[in-house]
Image (spheres, helix red, strand yellow):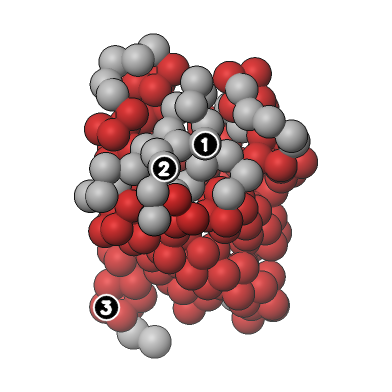
Amino acid sequence: MTETQIDLLYKIGFWAALVAFAGAVGYILSVFLQLFHLVNDYHDAVIAFGASILIPVPFLLTMLVLHHTVAEKKRFWIHAAIVFAVIYTTYATLNYVVQLATVIPAGYSWSFKNQQGTEGPLRLLNQTPHSLFWDIDALGYIFLSLSTLAAFPVFERQGLQRWVRRLFLANGLIIPLFSIAYFYPGYSVAQLLFGLPWGITVPGSLLALVLFFRRIRA
């Protein structure tokens, strides 16, 4: 592979990681908007799913860039990360498209006070606590974390790569926490806080990837 081709891959990795980072920040913003009632449930859902859909495909592209640029002896780990990222991308894209294209335009939403959500023929598709698409969303995040857990050995224990490595590992280790947030009976603000580390490890990992690709190109 020529230097020009490698530089193009790193450029793709940089922009893909940047878009995914913006999506993660947008989703975190939607959580605070929901908690402090700064927008109504409908608009909060638009922001949450609209931001979230920016993460899956760009994240998968960053894993593909790493696969084609890391040393041969590390290919197994990044290959495993890609497999998990594909599953994450499938679950997440399916969910977010259904919510944005079908559920939200039909006026469906939910809140902590009304966890059953809007009644109607599309209720099965609405991502309310412990619904079908709630579980799909949870599985998506689990496989995102498994992807970063598989990929963390690819990075060195020094310099900026050390931070990518630590954040990728941390994002994999928080699976039990947001599993509680998603699967524990009922749903409340207290349960939501179990997923709070996600708001640090995911955008942190993506920002570290942005800086990693930027530095390595330089």
Residue 137, percent from left and from top? 54, 52
Which numbered mark, 3 or 2, is in the foreground of this view? 2
Callout 1: SS? loop
Mark 3 lies on residue: 4
Looking at the picture, which amino acid does disc 1 mark?
A: Gln
The residue carrying mark 1 is 116
Q: Earlier in the sequence, mark 3 or mark 2?
A: 3
Asked if residue 81 can be seen in this view, the reply is yes
Residue at image location 45% in from the left, 37% down from the top: 117
Which amino acid type is marked by label 3?
Answer: Thr
Decide which of tag 1 and tag 3 comes sooner along the chain. Answer: 3
Question: In terms of secondary structure, where does tag 2 sit?
Answer: loop
Question: 78 or 145: which is nearer to us?
Answer: 145
Which numbered disc covers residue 119?
2
Q: Is residue 126 left or right of residue 167?
A: left
Question: Please, what secondary structure does the residue beneath circle 3 have?
Answer: helix
Say what amino acid the circle numbered 2 marks. Glu
- The reply to whether dot 1 and dot 3 touch (C-beta < 8 Å) is no
In front: 11, or 24?
Answer: 24
Locate residue 51, reporting x and y percent: 32, 44
183 left or right, relative to 23? right
Report crowding for label 3: few under 14, some 14 to 19, many 20 or more residues within 10 A (C-alpha).
Answer: few
Residue 156, image quadrant: bottom right
